[in-house]
Image (tube, grey):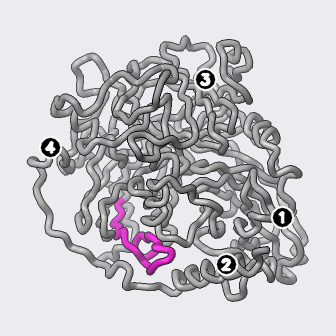
Amino acid sequence: MASAWTLLAVWVSAVASPCFAGDPYAYFDWDVSFITAAPLGVIGINGQFPGPIVNVSTNWNVVVNILNDLDEPLLITWNGIQHRKNSWQDGVLGTNCPIPSGWNWTYEFQVKDQIGSYFYFPSTGFQRAAGGYGGITVNNRDVIAVPFDKPDGDITLFLGDWYNRDYKDLRKALENGKELGMPDGVLMNGKGPYRYNRTLVPAGIAYETIHVHPGKRYRFRVHNVGISTSLNFRIQNHNLQLVETEGSYASQQNYTNLDVHVGQSYSFLVTMDQNASSDYYIVASARFVNQSHWARVTGVAILHYSNSKGKASGPLPDPPNDVYDKTYSMNQARSIRWNLSAGAARPNPQGSFRYGSINVSQVYVLQNKPPVVINGKHRTTLNGISFSPPETPLRLADEYKLKGIYTLDFPTRPLKGAPKVGRSVINGTFRGFMEIIFQNNHTKVQTFHMDGYSFFVVGMDYGEWTEESRGTYNKGDGVARCSTQVFPGAWTAILVSLDNVGIWNLRAQNLDTWYLGQEVYIRVVNPEDTNKTELPRPDNALYCGRLQKFQNEQTPHHRMTSYATVSCRAFELVMFMMMMLLVSVATLP
């Protein structure tokens, strides 16, 4: 019998679904469970943390059978996968009922016309703070040229801030109006930092080591899967050649470091061109904070050449000169450009889509602010509205023509007056071209993500956006991606072609502000009566809320023993976080 740990990739004929006919299928069988005890409460997949890499190619069909072995409902969302015609598989509360504890549910979707580096994660109940994430690699088809020579290896790095409190305690703190405060550390591929400093890092901590060979070139796929901390990524004495940004080939530029904001993904080519007198540090450190106070919020892994002459030692490579200098970070973001001559998922060059010459049909200015109190509860808002997910998903409500689930009246500008809780949805025009301006009136960097689409980042600057700001837009080679940062006291403008029918989540990637309501949905409907622009409701759709009566019950069938099982690595993580807490207490003035 095949193990549940194994990916079964098989070639099939056109028998499963007319829209998927002829393309390969990749099958996965995942058990999502707690693999350690508090204080970490790690969520693993098949006992792994991080979870397995979904490694497929353009147009492949992905089938993932999920057993929810947690003690509460679960959804997995596929950050950056566009689910063409198929928002049914998006894995957020606006489109899917959550998988009850002990139940199975199977996702089936196609990575249609996409390439690139993405990740998946649990989308409900603040669960991403406990893990449950993993990578998605979508390779080019053999017939499409890649704009660089094939690397000698492919390496995925997950970066993220981490708290030693259980994720349920974290979400309760947010609900009670408390800030999460400084994280307890930064994990790299689920491991603590190399002991670069004997005062800050206790002995005996497991750390990540990347093994390489001199003279070779490797592709590093870097994801910030954390909660709310922007991280500066760098590899000691090595240049980072940026080649891909969330499914778009970028104009190839070298960086000594790059800020990776929450929810963002990048691909770099890194050449092993050093003399290997010792190992080298791989660093992810917190940005826009007091570095001396936040010193523990630093992830450190090791780059180990096969001919290395010793262990890494000495100080870490420097971060940008002024850690509070957001202008440096903004200029860095502006420097990331679209590679106009490269093909991606299709043979035609990316630049053949001239987004700057398309007339805009809808404009939304989305303003966010720090948390506010609404009806006695702490909430975050967009345009003065804090979204409250309904018990019946929006897409199911449309399918069954239910009334009163949501309103199709989200304001194009911030509301005047007191903020409110609501379920207001953006009415997107099918095949229209939408301009969205994110205005960040919070004191922290926010990252915004849009499901179902890739959008063009055309401008960003400090101050309030005005109509005259359009004069600064990049209408030629602004990079296409699915998650963009918005600096505090600043704006970011995007353009998006609404060619994908469905109901799509637009959210803050910062887990704290998203959890408190900083999201909205965009409804895109084809007015023509046709089945060609959206797939039918899947036969295995889950039902909840006002449609609960249609649900066939499953008998819960847990496999794991939840918190009772403590793996060796999880134990090391627990010990690391406890020792870091003791170090922090010991160094208090």
Where is residue 199? Give x, y as percent: 80, 81
Residues under numbered marks 3 and 4 in contact, where contact means CB atoms less than 8 Å apart: no
Q: Nearer the viewer, mark 4 or mark 1?
A: 4
Residue assigned mark 3: 352
Amino acid type, label 1 = Gln
Mark 1 or mark 2: name the one nearer the start of the chain: 1
Q: Which mark is residue 54?
A: none
Q: Nearer the viewer, mark 2 or mark 4?
A: 2
Q: Nearer the viewer, mark 3 or mark 4?
A: 4
Alpha carbon separation for disc pair 3 and 1? 38 Å
Mark 4 neighbour density, 10 Å: few (under 14) some (14–19) many (20 or more): some
Give the magenta range: 27-48
Q: Residue 442 sits in which quadrant?
A: top right
Residue assigned mark 2: 580
Q: Residue 583 sits in which quadrant?
A: bottom right
Q: Nearer the viewer, mark 3 or mark 2?
A: 2
Mark 2 or mark 4: name the one nearer the start of the chain: 4
Mark 3 or mark 2: name the one nearer the start of the chain: 3
Q: Nearer the viewer, mark 1 or mark 2?
A: 2
Residue assigned mark 4: 547
Q: Quadrant of the N terminus?
A: bottom left
Secondary-structure class at tag 3 = helix
Q: Which mark is residue 236?
A: 1
Vertical placement of residue 315 versus 503, above or below: below
Identify the residue at horizontal 77%, vertical 67% (top origin). 295
- Left or right position of 415 against 585: left
Alpha carbon separation for disc pair 3 and 4? 45 Å
Alpha carbon separation for disc pair 1 and 2? 24 Å
- Left or right position of 117 against 104: right
